[in-house]
Amino acid sequence: MLALLGWQGVAWAVDIYTLDMNSSKSSFSDSHVLRLVTAALDASSAKYGPYAFRVAPMRMERDRLLQEMIKGELVNLSGQVTSQEWEQKLLPIRIPIDKGISCYRISLIDSRNQDLFNAVRSLDQLKALTLGAGRQWSLTTTYKQAGFNVVEGSTSAGLHSMLAAGRFQYFPRAIDEAIYEQEAYQPNFPTLIVERSFALYVPSPRYFFLGGGQKRLAQRLEYGMQMLIADGRFDHLFHEFYDGLIEKAGLRKRRIFRVDNPLLSPQTPLSNKAYWYTPY
């Protein structure tokens, strides 16, 4: 995908954005990211001029992606759950892309274990069960530090195989991931369901990150996103893409267990209510 915007009578340098399309995200979520990026860049054109936007053809695991983002050759823009390392080595735009909906985690389980989770009434009871998480994922360290019984895997596909084999009992995912992956993996795992009774809330916003040395590109994208927030389009895009998923996941009916995230940067804009979604 390539978008070019010109400006008559003025010589502009073209800002080039190459977006990583993370392989663990569903097309639903990716569509939101694409719409948000292009809307923000369009909104910034009067001030910053034309831009070029494309999607990187390669799909990479998180550690490799970080190294490529630092280089800024194959890819220079990615939407990722934040971590100390990413905030230190790259340029974060500290506006939660999805209004923090990815902080709410519902779980994929074997349907034969649903009664086990129905009986869970406290975070300590939940921690006694086994949780699956990716070795490279930023939330995995948070789960471990909070005292969860974590079983690690290398990839999303590998973790689904481990869940099917009973290596752990639940696999927390963002709402869009859980719904998408349940549909994708159920043909080979017929008893795979989205657990129905609880959600975890872990403060862990998903930000846009720009590669090192891309300060102008970061400033431009942040400026465009602030314009979308000011005129209501940021909220409109969120509700357009996520309201149906929130309803399908039954988020408002679930018991929500809150998990502290000591790894969260003090610069996280938790007090800015315009940035965050709350289900109640």
Image: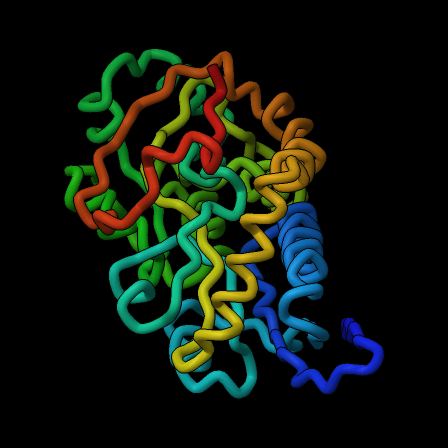
Residue 6 horizontal/vertical position (percent): 80, 76
Residue 53, quarter of the rendered image = bottom right
Give the camera-side residue of 12 and 122: 12
Give the camera-side residue of 159 and 5: 5
Q: Is residue 250 above or below residue 238?
A: above
Residue 68 horizontal/vertical position (percent): 45, 81
Residue 90 horizontal/vertical position (percent): 36, 71
Give the camera-side residue of 196 and 269: 269
Q: Is residue 230 above or below residue 80?
A: above
Residue for point 59% across, 40% down: 230
Split into 4 quadrants, where in the image is the N terminus? Answer: bottom right
Residue for point 17% across, 38% down: 146
Residue 108 in view: no
Residue furthest out toward the right: 8
Residue 225 in view: yes
Colour scheme = rainbow
In the drawing, does residue 75 fall left or right of residue 202? right
Q: Is residue 173 above or below residue 70?
A: above
Residue for point 53% across, 87% down: 73
Residue 26 horizontal/vertical position (percent): 63, 50
Residue 56, quarter of the rendered image = bottom right
Give the camera-side residue of 3 and 86: 3
In the drawing, does residue 9 fall left or right of residue 81? right
Residue furthest out toward the front: 9
Residue 241, quarter of the rendered image = top right
Q: How many marks?
A: 0
Residue for point 63% across, 70% down: 48
In the drawing, does residue 280 fall left or right of residue 10? left
